[in-house]
Image (tube, rainbow, N blue to C red):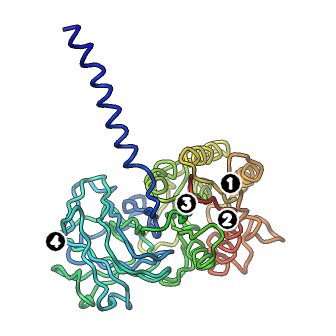
Amino acid sequence: MLATMRIAFPVLLLSFAFGSSVQLQAAAADPEGHWVSVWTASQYAPLKFLPFPSETPITGTLRMVVRPSLGGERIRLRLSNTYGTTALQAGAVHIALTDSESKIVPGTDRAVTFGGSPAITIPAGAPAVSDPVDLSVKALAELSVSIYLPSQTEISTWHRGAQHDSYLAGPGDMTSSLELPHPETKHAWYFLSAIEMWEPPTTTAVVAFGDSITEGSNNLPKSYADYPDQLSERMAGRDRHGSMAFVNEGIGGNRILHDGAGASALARFDTDVLSNPGVSNLIVLEGINDIGFPRIRMAELKIPNVTLKENIFASQKVSSDQMVQGLQQIATRAHDHRIRVFCGTLMPFEGTNSYDAEGEAIRQSVNTWIRSSTVFDGVVDFDALVRDPDHPSRLRSAYDSGDHIHPNPDGYKAMADLASKLSFATPKQ
């Protein structure tokens, strides 16, 4: 038996080495190109911490309009059942160029398959990546993604506050219809987390990672006023380092250290940043909700038919040291994947009902650390850009959307202009 083991052992080693060689060859970069995320929407479960009615299950055909930051000739979709507790059934998926509203451009409809099948069942907690589809798409051109849900489907994984309305019609599979008949308008993207394009090797993606200020809250749908979209528009056609995609992974209400409005930034980092193909740069703007949420004076909130007395976040106060540690973790994890990291300073929030002197002191402490830190590849001083020079704890009025925390389109444009000056990394070598 010992002799047999001595013979088998090197055979096992050779087998392992051969298998590793095959894997390494398969993982080698394709000199012709690679997949790059060109549009994203952070997925999360419907918010549970406010006493709003639960989302009604849906069935029929969903048509969602998205705007990729780059164009291409081959495209694939990434669906998500990340927060589902049961399998998600998609009976059919189609993609086409958008004409207007729920109408698509004739002749551009393409069926999307998954391993050659037009339907897919996505296990609870899992994503799904489609097969490539040939479709010529220009940068900043709207696409319509249609998903047929053959049975009543719980809204478990979505992105509320979409930059463009979505449309629901049914029952039945209308994914290839030129226009949905009498659709119900929705204000979310459902189960759709990314659009990916086959791009040249010099093309990479920049992820904007943050909360509602990154998401673009307080602006009209279809305006694409958020700073990542305006950054895409500004950088379109510029050839400093080859083409770059700019994708938005912001969630309204998100925090670095606690769940609530989506998983915490630390918990969702792998899904929303590292799982995106082609990422070489990251802009982080997180933390103002870590400061503000525990200080919200709930009784002052004006929500129709809702009275709130206790702040359920009151026990989740964080220190500046804890926030700094969280930002350090993000930088370290990004650098482990050779992603260049830029950190934005936290913007003013005086005038909101979560502002107090203690919270402002924490914001100033975190910003002082960001400006002097060596853990990032650069700093985007959004605070210095948008603050009122005569009252630095407030947004300047020209940039205030009215709620004293979210910029208006001009404020977001100023943010995009500032971010466009960053020294983004060239493709990872």
Mark number, residue 359: 1
Q: Secondary structure at mark 1?
A: helix
Which residue is labeled 4 in the image? Answer: 150
Sequence-wise, the earlier of marks 4 and 1 is: 4
Q: Amino acid at mark 3?
A: Phe
Residue at 53% x, 80% y: name it: 224
Sequence-first disc among 3 and 2: 3
Which of pointers 3 and 4 lies earlier in the amino acid sequence? 4
Q: Position of residue 325 (x, y in %)?
A: 62, 42
Q: Which residue is mark 3?
A: 209
Kindly identify the residue that appears in the image at 47 percent across and 69 percent down.
38
x and y, in percent, of residue 272 in the image: 46, 57
Observer-nearest of 155 and 234:
234
Check disc 1 and give the amino acid type: Gly
What residue type is disc 2 on?
Phe
Residue 77: image quadrant is bottom left
Q: Which residue is mark 2?
A: 349
Q: CA distance from mark 2 to mark 4?
A: 45 Å
